[in-house]
Image (cartoon, rainbow, N blue to C red):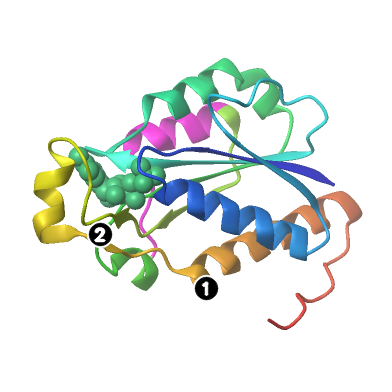
Amino acid sequence: MHVLVVYASKMGGTEGIALQVRDAFVDRGLTADIAAVEDARSLDGYDAVVIGSGLYATHWRRSARRFVRRNVEALQAIPVWFFSSGPLDPSAAEHNIPPVGQVRSLMDRVGSRGHATFGGRLPADAKGFPASAMAKELSGDWRDAEQIRGWADEIVDELTLLTTGSPASPASPR
Ligand SMILES: Cc1cc2nc3c(=O)[nH]c(=O)nc-3n(C[C@H](O)[C@H](O)[C@H](O)COP(=O)(O)O)c2cc1C
């Protein structure tokens, strides 16, 4: 099983989540690659794809939206999951936050099997406006490693069931 995790990240927070998802897949025995959307050229050879983006003004980054549009047909042919990263508070770890409308539309176009919203990260020394102004009040890291790992585990379970018809063996203790 060969899986690709692609991400759009401006300040590095979403890239960190993508790395955690990739590592969780590898721990469960999948072959998993990771790439920024700008570098992911072809989906040939992949059995499933996870696509994530940071949220900016309630939108995915344009590069992530373009990636989905550019690859609609390839994505329709394999299982796909989306994730968003944004909230600068504990809300994303406390309850399920649905995708923003634009992401919901992209999910419908490719038949995405699921979505998760994870907390975001805003560095105290964020550069540029309005990030630097926001950082005076809102800096912090709200990414929850357990939530991310749990979601990745669910994907492995679903993929295993899809491809073998049998449940996966339990995740090894961490
Ligand atoms: C200008 C700006 C706008 C943002 N807008 C949103 C938003 O609409 N919704 C949200 O949940 N988070 C929002 N955030 C928080 C970011 O999504 C969060 O910092 C995220 O981790 C950034 O991802 P990145 O580090 O991969 O670029 C915003 C942050 C900035 C700096």
Amino acid on which disc 1 is placed: Glu
| Earlier residue among tags 1 and 2 | 2
Residue range highlighted in magenta = 96-109
Most prominent secondary structure in the magenta stretch? helix
Query: In what element is the residue under mark 2?
Result: loop
Q: Residue 153 magenta-drawn?
A: no
Q: Position of residue 68 (x, y in %)?
A: 53, 25
- Helix, strand or loop for disc 1: helix
Horizontal side of 18 relative to 55 (left or right) equals: right
- Residue under circle 2? 88
Quadrant into which the C terminus falls? bottom right
Which residue is at a point 35% across and 43% down the rendered structure image? 11
Where is 68 relative to 88, above or below?
above
Position of 25 compared to 70: left or right?
Answer: right
Residue 17 screen position, x and y as percent: 50, 54
Q: Residue at x 59, y 25 (%)?
A: 39
The verdict on label 2 being within 8 Å of ligand 1 is: yes
Question: Tag count in the figure?
Answer: 2
Please state if 8 lies on the left or on the right of 57 as rendered. Answer: right
Q: Position of residue 85 (x, y in %)?
A: 39, 50
According to the picture, the residue beneath numbered tag 1 turns out to be 146
Kind of residue indicated by mark 2: Leu
Q: Residue at x 73, y 40 (%)?
A: 48
Category of crowding for the residue at label 1, using alpha-carbon neighbours closer than 10 angstroms: few (below 14), some (14–19), many (at least 20): few
